[in-house]
Image (cartoon, rainbow, N blue to C red):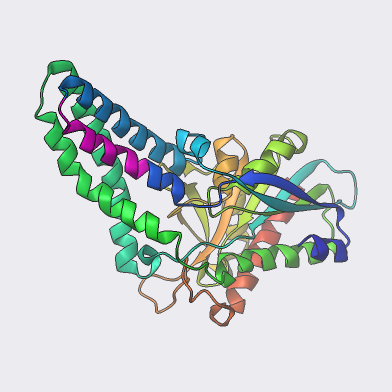
Amino acid sequence: MAAQMQALGLRDVRLEPFRSSPSTYRPFVLAFLAPLLGTLLAWLPGGTWTLGAAALLSALGAGGMLAETELAPNWMRILLPRAGSQNAVGALPPESTAQRRAILCAHLDTHRTPLFYSSKAWNHLFAILVPGAFAGSAVAAVACALGALLAWEGARWIGLAAAPLGLVALGLCLSADWTPFSPGANDNASGVAVVLDLADRLRTHPLQHTEVWLAFTGCEEVGAYGMAAFLDAHAGQLGKEAVYIALDQVGIGRLTYLTADGLVLKRRTHPHALDLARTAASALPDLAVREQVGLAYTDALVATKRGLVALTLCSLPAPGSDETAGWHQMTDTPEHIDPGSLAAACAFAWQVLQDIDRS
């Protein structure tokens, strides 16, 4: 990507290293394991202190799980090893004086292909299983704490009842890191292609007053570490008014922008970002762009949590259609990419950039 940006004549092209977790699933392994250890501990002789320890371990599991889904610092990240990655960054100057900035973002990494992404039925089951395991850990923490305070030994049965969900979730997360990585044509070579196409267009048709940055991020799939590193390095320089546009899976289906982002807690998209999206949608009625709440998280979530103006563009198969996005599957290969979906994403993102420049 750095070489591509240099060939396109971008300025200040550079690679920016950072440290990241090498796995999506290892933090969750610890989060599921802690309550299970607590359940075992609660059944050891010793009375209230074992229930108190079980409550602590269950609380650590529930709290760590929630924090990890929020891409927030937590005790699991402290314990687990880190590995090196990097972002590729460049910029395109405007025709005249720079008065505002826009950042086009696309992540470069792909995801593993665990069993629970293999079909819609598995998707739905896993979507129930993870919140269920979290709720079980939280309930076990409260019950064991009350058991320790009130000398109520029946509390240990509540933890035992919650254990099967956590055990299944633990097994699935352990197995995930043994699966191959997806080829990643849609997720996210499609977003990368659209950003490069927009950069090529901006090279010959620069905006009047908007400097456009390109941020190709690493490690989005394991917790958006690349986007966090980019913001740590540049958010102050770019300013609060900068607009971040994340293109993620724009190669199959109907173009969509997200009104909220997040894996469990849904963070509402910044109002100004939604205004820009809706204005562009009105200007391009033939694209029939739709809006919806995101299913998981994207790089934009990191910016949204910091109060920044961030918008995610993606394309989703129409409900009931035979299209499949190949999300985290080995079928995510180039022959399934729809050039029309790519063109729609390009046109819409270009319209958003024009509206930013005229604002």
Q: Nearer the viewer, residue 288 or 316?
A: 316
Would you say residue 139 is visible in this rendering? no
Residue name at image x 13 percent, y 17 percent: 150
Classify 297 as above or below 122. above
Place of residue 128 in the rendered image (x, y in percent of width and height, measured from the top left): 28, 53
Vertical relation: 160 (above or below) 326:
above
- Side of 192 where 267 appears, left or right: left
Quarter of the image with the C terminus in it: top right
Res 102 visible? yes
Q: Is residue 196 above or below residue 86?
A: below
Residue at screen point 18% across, 28% down: 143
Query: Residue 145: image x %, image y %?
Result: 22, 23
Residue extending farthest bottom = 335
**Left or right: where 165 falls relative to 279:** left
Residue 9 drawn in magenta: no
Q: Does residue 4 appear left or right of residue 320 in this picture? A: right
**Residue 90 percent location from the top left of the image:** 80, 53
Q: Position of residue 181 (x, y in %)?
A: 52, 67
Q: Quadrant of the N terminus?
A: bottom right
Q: Nearer the viewer, residue 171 or 233?
A: 171
Viewer-closest of 32 and 7:
32
- Decide whether the magenta segment is chiefly helix, strand or loop: helix
Quarter of the rendering containing residue 301? top right
Residue at the far top: name it.
149
Q: Is-magenta flag for residue 33?
A: yes
- Residue extent of the magenta highlight: 31-45
